[in-house]
Amino acid sequence: MIRKNPSGDLPQIHPDAFIDPTAILCGKVVVHANVFIGPYAVIRADEVNAAGEMDPIVIGAHSNIQDGVVIHSKSGAAVTIGERTSIAHRAIVHGPCTVGDDVFIGFNSVLFNCNVAQGCVVRHNAVVDGCDLPAGFYVPSTQRIGPQTDLSTIPKLTVQASEFSEDVARTNNALVLGYKRIQNEF
């Protein structure tokens, strides 16, 4: 469902993107080319700041927002998802938040008030809250990363984790083409 927010903003969706009919996109959302947004995802840009303004939620080209993902933002703050980035099933990205290019966010993970730089991998059920992750950083499953976390104690990104992330991105890019081809059949 594509709908306006109370401020009257309507999502802007590139014609080459695929949005599952069960997904909800509300308000000041910008979706670039070849993006896959899966079933029951909710991307909602509807809150304003004290001045009555809001920044958009932007989904970069060739990214995938999988089943049940929630992307929202506090008080109209910006959320940017880079290009070729995968946000896996039931993850929550709550702004203010910037997620760089070629990033993988695992199942049920939560991002809030953070910057996740290019090439990072955040595995399943992890939390990144109130801190910035440098490029190529790896967050193991179930890890909680916050402002007091000593990032030097976290294991480095493995080739296997990086390859898994790239495979997920490739698979979901192919799904965009397949679903666009049959979208008038459902």
Image (cartoon, grey):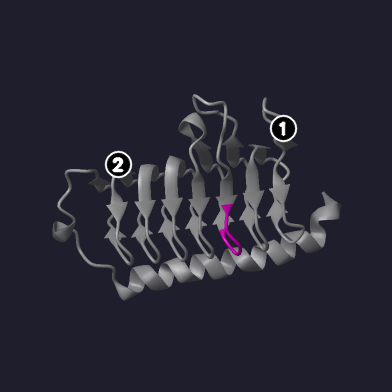
Q: Is residue 39 visible?
A: no
Q: Start and end of the magenta stretch?
A: 59-63
Identity of the residue furthest to the right in this view: 184
In the displayed structure, 73 sits above or below 131; it is above
Neighbours of disc 1 within 10 Å: few (<14), some (14-19), many (20+): some
Q: Position of residue 104 (x, y in %)?
A: 43, 59
In the displayed structure, 161 sits above or below 73; it is below
Quadrant showing the N terminus:
top right
Q: Residue at x 43, y 45 (%)?
A: 97
Q: Is residue 26 left or right of residue 131?
A: right
**Residue that label 2 marks:** 130
Q: Residue at x 41, y 73 (%)?
A: 163
**Residue that label 1 marks:** 4
Q: Secondary structure at mark 1?
A: loop
- Which quarter of the picture shows residue 127? top left
Q: Position of residue 103 (x, y in %)?
A: 43, 61
Q: Secondary structure at mark 2?
A: loop
Give the CA distance from mark 2 to mark 1.
30 Å
